[in-house]
Image: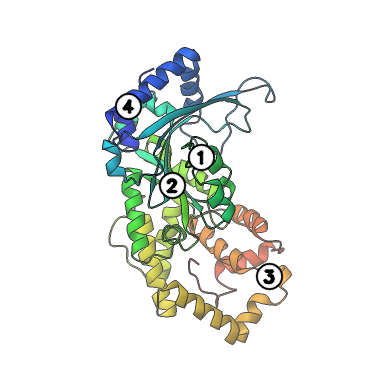
Amino acid sequence: MTFNSSVFERLLFPLHKQVYRKIHDTLHDIDRKYPGLLKQIIACFSKVAQSDTQTPVWQPGRADEASYPSLDIVIMFNPRVDHTVSQLRKSADYKVFFDRKDNTPAQFKGSHLLVTFYHNKTQNTFIIPLAYLLGFNEKAVLRDGSYQLYSHTILPSGNQDFNNEMRIDEKSADYSNLLSRQEHYQQNSLVYVGITKQTWQKRYRRHCCDSGRGSNLLFHRALRGEMGKIGVIEHIVERAGLTEQQALEIEEKEVEKRSLHSLFPNGLNMIPGGYAGLKYVHQYATRTGFTLNNELTVDNIESVLVDVQRHNLNKQFQTFDIQQVNAKIARLWAEDIDYRINVMTNHHNRFSFRQIQAARIWHACGWSFEKIHHYLQKLDSRKINREQLVCLLRGETYASIPDVLY
């Protein structure tokens, strides 16, 4: 098998040529030691490459007897040296190791290449499916205008156990097990999912720009450290070489199953993905009187959403500063007795604020009535009947509750 450095640089960034030779030699050694393994990896990935990462793919044979070949190749730059992406091209201070396993279906997560370095004491990890680097769907991946599905995972460092676990052993200089220790904290991590027609790096810079201009969207707040100091941030290329339709359909499923904040507390996506997300922003802009001057695309949707939200907050609260908005909403709850009674009386069979916000978003996205009702029952223990939901979606009840992303 031949390592494709052009695909690597398309999906990530340039590294020292010596690193490429080392990856190639590692793959050659693996192919010799485990004949047919790399072909199996490509075959497994080809069955999931055009679906979301949460949908299981059927394989012949009994589930309890099936096993899937897994291979992770890790390129780890010296953690005691501060790096930036641009500096990696000249750096030869790294180690390469690999982890080969046979996993049951429940444990199988695929095969990947990982690049890890430290910048400002924060661990940065970049992950891509190994199959792409072995030539899978190469023409589509390299084609200008093809789409990528990406995710960003943030592990806060505020937990003391985390700080102790991630500390490097200075004497042995052994940092090969940082990956497994990091995986231990995945269940506590924050996750954001997106798609792009550019590259995920350009989209990420756009996210950072929106974060810097005070966006109150959850992902942008997390990037500013408002949800805890960032200890590790992962950038994962989940899928590449997609058409626009494939990307939009996959993102919609991926966000719904993994990172939609109304369904997952650690999710950072505030609205559904794909076609549903585009429809919501159009509806939100119309409802708030915001004029869309440019075509809405997957690459400007968050920036437009930031502008619509700022417009709406200014309109309702005369500020878009989230702390001031929080204070005004708290005052509204405390001082407006009708507002409080409307929301809280007979709380066991009335909507919670979380349900109200989620129902409005999902309705604007075009979700079916049955789907909205199903997910609302999962959100909260309150028993909401169909008539109550109809009234809410028509705007006949809870009109005093602000229609904002919050």
Helix, strand or loop under label 2: strand
Query: Reading the chain from its start, which is encountered first: label 4 or label 3?
Result: 4
- The percent coordinates of residue 217 (x first, y second) are 44, 62
Residue drawn where x is 58% and y is 87% of the image: 335
Residue drawn where x is 59% and y is 74% of the image: 398
- Decide: few, some or many residues near mark 2? Use Cα within 10 Å; few <14, some 14-19, many ≥20: some
Query: Reading the chain from its start, which is encountered first: label 2 or label 4?
Result: 4
Of residues 100 and 275, the one nearer the viewer is 100
Say if 363 sits above or below 50 in the image: below
Residue situated furthest front in the rendering: 171
Find out whether the residues at labels 2 and 3 contact each other: C-beta distance under 8 Å. no
Query: Reading the chain from its start, which is encountered first: label 2 or label 3?
Result: 2
Q: CA distance from mark 2 to mark 3?
A: 44 Å
- Decide: few, some or many residues near mark 3? Use Cα within 10 Å; few <14, some 14-19, many ≥20: some
Q: Which residue is mark 2?
A: 123
Q: Which residue is mark 1?
A: 178
Find out whether the residues at labels 4 and 3 contact each other: C-beta distance under 8 Å. no
- The percent coordinates of residue 392 (x first, y second) are 59, 68
